[in-house]
Image (spheres, grey):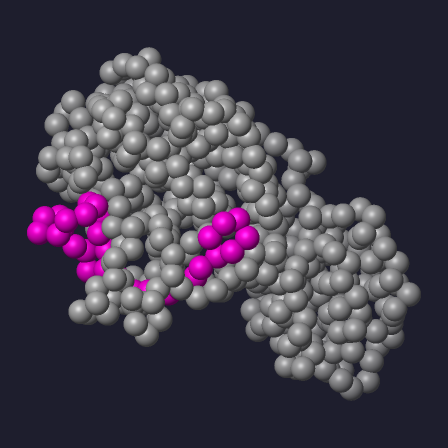
């Protein structure tokens, strides 16, 4: 997770308080609004108290008396039990503070069916956002199953010594359950389970402005619960007219001139307009109480309603941890929101092209974040280019690290994800290639014939996170399938 920082001065015409408000009056649930550079602002944490955090109950299960034989074993019971339980509590309390999750431990381990039945009834009455179950003996799996059936998202820490394959085969695949059978005694999987709880809570409280067409209306996308605020396309173009070349805008221009590896097509005027578009986006986010933004950018450019596509503005927002999505793509909004909240890093939404000669997978777009390793990590090198299709404005050509493992993820509607794995082979230049400016070629883990890949506008994400997304989908009712 990120560490809290302070905003040093105004950003793009918006002061520290306004920047907080730009994410809706508060930066949702432990999610940190990051400005793109430390000079603009470091990080801003949500102003919330522990009473606002999602709550998780924690319960241990064990035989009432000291036992004889059976895993984890009498030796473990005699020598390790007390220290293990104490460490579990300490780690979970620490994770709760880091992730902003309220933790409530049952006072004593539960013994037997009667105690577990009473606990299940309590869960069904209080409805915490999650429950963590830690069995301390192999005989407890029937009772673990009872708790998992309570209808509360369930995290089960099946540490080495408490289960065989048969104990968990069915339960590990049960909807609403994240079961980690593991030798990780630092409880890393428990932390990830708590992170999923926090993510689901944050996504459900988040709203994305979709700027397209003429209507203003609200909707909620279930089962993820993301809120959509639809706004007329004129909202962006009219707001842009109110943003001038302020000192803050010019500071953004100077920053990109210094940090870009090189600048090819854009003029200084192009950079000024791109920085104005960034400030425009922040103003709309503030005014509409939204935590993400997307618009019909190609339509506005085609109709010559704005001097630059918002490619640089969107890339900068993504680097700050604010989902910014091309082309008013609702599924992209869901994917970016879940990616940013769950992984603390942005994704790259792209147009997919199969290379049928090399049997590889190419993704290209003119909006690409640079903070691919994480919001608090160094940027990948980038070149400032024009928007390829119009040859106006500013886009960011990000140079991806060759050999880097990549996850491919796309929401197909709010209830299904397409997932795959890849490895970066090379970056492609435009020209000689046509298409968008950031253009990345991957070797992928299937299908065997790249022509059979599914989806469009998938996210490319640094790192292997397929199992993370599968776990999130299983926990929260989102189907997954291979690309």
Horizontal relation, residue 103 to residue 418: left or right: right
Q: Does the magenta stretch include residue 162?
A: no
Residue 338 in view of the camera:
yes
Q: How many marks do you count on the picture?
A: 0
Q: In which quarter of the image is residue 292?
A: top left
Name the image quarter holding the C terminus. Answer: bottom left
| Range of residues picked out in magenta | 412-441
Q: Residue furthest left?
A: 432
Residue 378 in view of the camera:
no
Q: Residue at x 30, y 31 (%)?
A: 299
Q: In which quarter of the image is residue 386?
A: top left
Relative vertical location of residue 360 with respect to residue 139 in this rendering, above or below: above
Horizontal relation, residue 363 to residue 121: left or right: left
Q: Residue at x 32, y 27 (%)?
A: 278
Relative vertical location of residue 460 with respect to residue 201 in this rendering, above or below: below
Q: Where is residue 354 in the image (x, y as percent from the top left)?
A: 25, 62
């Amino acid at each position: 997770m990120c560490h809290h920082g302070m905003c040093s001065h105004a950003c793009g015409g918006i002061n520290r308080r306004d920047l907080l408000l730009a994410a809706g009056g508060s930066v949702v649930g432990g999610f940190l609004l990051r400005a793109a550079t430390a000079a603009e602002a470091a990080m801003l944490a949500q102003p919330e108290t522990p009473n606002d955090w999602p709550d998780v109950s924690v319960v241990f299960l064990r035989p009432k008396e000291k036992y004889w034989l059976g895993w984890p074993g009498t030796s473990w019971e005699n020598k390790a039990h007390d220290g293990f339980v104490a460490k579990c509590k300490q780690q979970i309390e620490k994770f709760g503070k880091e992730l902003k999750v309220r933790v409530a431990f049952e006072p004593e381990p539960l013994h037997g069916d009667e105690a577990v039945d009473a606990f299940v009834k309590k869960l069904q009455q209080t409805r915490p956002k999650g429950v963590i179950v830690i069995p301390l003996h192999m005989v407890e799996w029937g009772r673990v199953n009872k708790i998992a059936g309570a209808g509360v998202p369930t995290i089960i820490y099946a540490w080495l010594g408490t289960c065989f394959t048969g104990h968990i085969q069915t339960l590990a695949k049960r909807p609403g359950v994240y079961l980690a059978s593991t030798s990780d005694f630092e409880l890393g999987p428990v932390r990830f389970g708590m992170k999923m709880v926090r993510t689901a809570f944050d996504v459900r409280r988040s709203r994305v402005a979709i700027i397209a067409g003429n209507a203003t209306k609200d909707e909620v996308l279930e089962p993820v619960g993301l809120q959509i605020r639809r706004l007329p396309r004129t909202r962006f173009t009219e707001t842009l007219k109110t943003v001038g070349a302020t000192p803050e805008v010019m500071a953004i221009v100077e920053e990109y001139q210094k940090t870009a590896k090189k600048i090819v097509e854009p003029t200084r005027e192009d950079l000024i307009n791109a920085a104005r578009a960034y400030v425009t986006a922040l103003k709309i986010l503030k005014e509409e109480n939204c935590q993400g933004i997307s618009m019909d950018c190609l339509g506005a450019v085609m109709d010559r309603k704005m001097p630059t596509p918002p490619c640089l503005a969107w890339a900068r927002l993504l680097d700050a941890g604010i989902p910014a999505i091309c082309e008013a793509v609702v599924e992209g909004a869901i994917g970016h929101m879940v990616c940013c909240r769950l992984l603390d890093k942005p994704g790259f939404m792209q147009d997919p092209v199969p290379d049928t000669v090399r049997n590889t997978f190419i993704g290209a777009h003119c909006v690409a974040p640079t903070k691919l390793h994480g919001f608090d990590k160094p940027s990948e090198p980038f070149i400032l280019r024009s928007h390829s299709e119009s040859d106006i404005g500013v886009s960011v050509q990000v140079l991806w690290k060759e050999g880097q493992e990549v996850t491919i993820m796309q929401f197909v509607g709010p209830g299904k994800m397409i997932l795959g794995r890849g490895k970066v082979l090379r970056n492609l230049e435009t020209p000689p290639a046509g298409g968008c400016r950031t253009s990345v070629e991957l070797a992928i883990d299937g299908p065997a014939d790249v022509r059979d890949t599914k989806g469009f506008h998938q996210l490319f994400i640094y790192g292997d996170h397929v199992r993370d997304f599968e776990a999130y989908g299983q926990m929260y009712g989102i189907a997954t399938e291979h690309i």
